[in-house]
Image (cartoon, grey):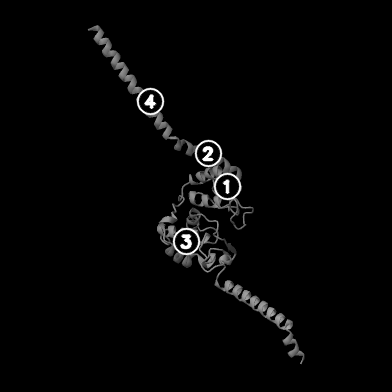
C-alpha cells in the first residue's frame, strides 16, 4: 500500500511538473509575441531623443511648436510626420522656406522612430492606399477635376501663386494618399467627405500610370501638353520643309539644262 501511495504521489508530482513546464512555455511564447509593445515604447523613446536633438529648435521640446519658427505637431499624427520626413520636406533649411521634395535627411530606422514619437501625441494614421483596388478611369477624372490645375494633367508639376506644384514622378501611392489628406503647404486638404478611400486608391493608380505611361502617339517629348507639343511639331515641320527646299535648290543649280535655260 505504501508503495502504491508513493507511486501515486510521484505521478502527481510529475504531472504538476509537466503542467508547470507547459505554463512556463506558454508564458515564454506570450512574452515572445508581446515585444511590439516594448519595442513600440522603445521606438517612441528613441524618437523623442532624436526629436529633441534635431527638431525641437523649431517645433519645441514636446512638439508644442514655437511661434514664428514651427507649428505644434501635437495631433498631426503619423500621417503628416511620415509624409514630410519620407519626402525630405523636413527638416527645412530655413523656417520660412518652402518645403520641397528632396532626399530624406534621416535613415528609415530614425524616420520610424520620429514618426512613432509624433504619433504618440495622437492624430490620424498613415492611410492604407492600394492602387490595385482603384479604377484608372475614375482616377483620371478625379485628377483632372482636383489636381491637374496645379500639377498638370501629366503630373509634371508647375508654378502656382507663391509656391511650386511639384512633379509627381517620384510619388509613391502612400505619399499620394498622405498628400491628399495632409494638404502640404498651399495644397488644399481633402478629407473623407471630399475624396473617399476608394477614390484615393483610384487617384494613386492614375499617378502610378503617369509615371510609366503608354506613348501611343510615338515620341512622348516629356508629355508637356498639347500646346507646346503642337509648337514642337510645327517647328520640326518647318525645319523639314526648309531642308527639302534647300536640297531641291542645290539640285537645280547642278542641272546643266537648268543652267543653260537660266543663262539663255
* Residue at the (24%, 7%) spot, across then down: 2
* Residue at the (72%, 87%) spot, across then down: 257
Q: Are marks 1 and 3 in contact (CB under 8 Å)?
A: no
Q: CA distance from mark 1 to mark 2?
A: 16 Å
Q: CA distance from mark 4 to mark 3?
A: 53 Å
Q: Which residue is mark 1?
A: 60
Query: If you read the primary sequence from the N terminus, does the residue marked by circle 4 or circle 1 appear first?
Result: 4
Q: Are marks 1 and 2 in contact (CB under 8 Å)?
A: no
Res 45 label: 2
Q: Quadrant of the N terminus?
A: top left
Q: Which residue is mark 4?
A: 24
Q: Are marks 4 and 3 in contact (CB under 8 Å)?
A: no
Query: If you read the primary sequence from the N terminus, does the residue marked by circle 1 or circle 3 appear first?
Result: 1
Query: If you read the primary sequence from the N terminus, does the residue marked by circle 1 or circle 2 appear first?
Result: 2
Q: CA distance from mark 4 to mark 1?
A: 46 Å
Give the x, y percent position of residue 77. 48, 49
Q: Residues within 10 Å of mark 3 (few under 14, many from 20)?
A: many
Secondary structure of residue under mark 1 = loop
Front-most of 81 and 70? 81
* Residue at the (35%, 22%) spot, across then down: 20
Amino acid at each position: 500500500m505504501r508503495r502504491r501511495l508513493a507511486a501515486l504521489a510521484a505521478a502527481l508530482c510529475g504531472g504538476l511538473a509537466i503542467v508547470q513546464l507547459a505554463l512556463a512555455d506558454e508564458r515564454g511564447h506570450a512574452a515572445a509575441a508581446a515585444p511590439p509593445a516594448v519595442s513600440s515604447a522603445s521606438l517612441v523613446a528613441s524618437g523623442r531623443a532624436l526629436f529633441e536633438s534635431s527638431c525641437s529648435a523649431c517645433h519645441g521640446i514636446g512638439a508644442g511648436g514655437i511661434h514664428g519658427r514651427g507649428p505644434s505637431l501635437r495631433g498631426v499624427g503619423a500621417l503628416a510626420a511620415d509624409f514630410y520626413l519620407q519626402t525630405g520636406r523636413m527638416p527645412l533649411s530655413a523656417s520660412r522656406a518652402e518645403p520641397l521634395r528632396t532626399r530624406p535627411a534621416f535613415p528609415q530606422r530614425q524616420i520610424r522612430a520620429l514618426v512613432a514619437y509624433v504619433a504618440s501625441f495622437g492624430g490620424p494614421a498613415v492611410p492604407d492606399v492600394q492602387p490595385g483596388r482603384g479604377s484608372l478611369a475614375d482616377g483620371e477624372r478625379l485628377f483632372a477635376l482636383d489636381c491637374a490645375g496645379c500639377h498638370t494633367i501629366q503630373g509634371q508639376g508647375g508654378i502656382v501663386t507663391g509656391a511650386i506644384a511639384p512633379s509627381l514622378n517620384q510619388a509613391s501611392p502612400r505619399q499620394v494618399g498622405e498628400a491628399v489628406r495632409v494638404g502640404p503647404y498651399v495644397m488644399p486638404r481633402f478629407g473623407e467627405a471630399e475624396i473617399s478611400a476608394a477614390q484615393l486608391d483610384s487617384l494613386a493608380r492614375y499617378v502610378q500610370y503617369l509615371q510609366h505611361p503608354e506613348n501611343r502617339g510615338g515620341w512622348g517629348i516629356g508629355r508637356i501638353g498639347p500646346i507646346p507639343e503642337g509648337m514642337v511639331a510645327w517647328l520640326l515641320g518647318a525645319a523639314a520643309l526648309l531642308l527639302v527646299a534647300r536640297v531641291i535648290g542645290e539640285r537645280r543649280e547642278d542641272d546643266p539644262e537648268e543652267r543653260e535655260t537660266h543663262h539663255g
